[in-house]
């Protein structure tokens, strides 16, 4: 075996290890991002049991949003890099579907859920009022939809179904 062959194998090995590291960080980011979002209902239910805890719980959820956001951004960037490096076409059904769902989830999270959460925080001093209860119900529904989209994306990323074509 020539030195050239060994060098190419070493480069391929190093590239593959870097790809695996990126993939691991991608999965870890999904765990942190979705995991943070999955705790919101728990926070709200615990706050229901303690008088005056709603504002604290809602502000905690807002902080968790700020923690989850960088993980969601890293998920997009690392996913795009892995698609580019692997040579999988962007038009592959599970890739395209996942990207469309990701941007729908980002819109729902950033605009719809964010404004619903701010409304809840604004009304949190009156947690039994009709306005607060309506805002909470809306926020929970949107949050569950976002979580469902995240689970569907995770399914597509893991199973890579053919879908069409």
Image (spheres, grey):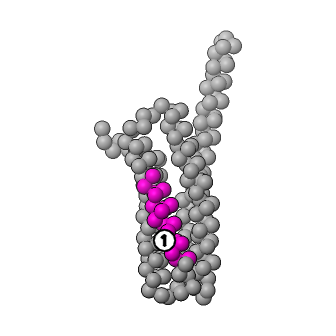
- Nearest the eye: 15 or 2: 15
Tell me which segment is drawn in magenta: 103-121
Asked if residue 115 can be seen in this view, the reply is yes
Residue placed under numbered mark 1 in the picture: 116
Q: Quadrant of residue 31?
A: bottom right
Tell whether position 67 is magenta: no
Q: Position of residue 95 (x, y in %)?
A: 43, 42
Q: Main secondary structure of the magenta part?
A: helix
Tag 1 secondary structure: helix
Point out the residue furthest to the right here.
3
Residue 30: in sight, yes or no?
A: no
**Residue at x-position 61% and y-position 61%:** 66
Query: Taking 52 as reference, is 100 above or below it?
Result: above
Q: Would you say residue 113 sits in the magenta stretch?
A: yes
Estimate how packed mark 1 is, as few (under 14), some (14 to 19) or many (20 or more) residues with alpha carbons within 10 Å: many
Taking 7 as reference, is 82 above or below it? below
Residue at image position (67%, 11%) is 2
Return the x and y of residue 114 as percentages of the image width and height. Answer: 51, 66
- Above or below, 39 against 76 in this view is below
The quadrant holding residue 148 is: bottom left
Residue 53: x, y in percent? 61, 82
Quadrant where the C terminus is found in the figure: top left
Marks counted in the figure total 1
Nearer to the camera, 69 or 39: 69
Determine whether 12 is above or below 100 in the image: above
């Amino acid at each position: 075996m020539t030195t050239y062959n060994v060098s190419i194998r070493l480069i391929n090995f190093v590239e593959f290890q870097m790809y695996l590291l990126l993939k691991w960080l991608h999965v870890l980011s999904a765990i942190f991002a979705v995991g943070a979002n999955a705790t919101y209902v728990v926070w709200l239910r615990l706050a229901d049991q303690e008088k005056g805890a709603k504002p604290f719980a809602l502000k905690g959820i807002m902080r968790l949003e700020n923690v989850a956001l960088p993980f969601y951004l890293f998920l997009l960037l690392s996913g795009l890099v892995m698609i580019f490096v692997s040579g999988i076409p962007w038009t592959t059904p599970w890739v395209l579907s996942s990207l469309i769902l990701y941007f729908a989830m980002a819109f729902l999270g950033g605009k719809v859920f964010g404004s619903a959460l701010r409304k809840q925080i604004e009304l949190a001093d009156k947690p039994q009022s009709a306005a607060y209860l309506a805002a909470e119900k809306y926020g929970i529904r949107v949050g569950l939809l976002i979580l469902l989209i995240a689970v569907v994306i995770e399914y597509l990323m893991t199973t890579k179904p053919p879908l069409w074509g």
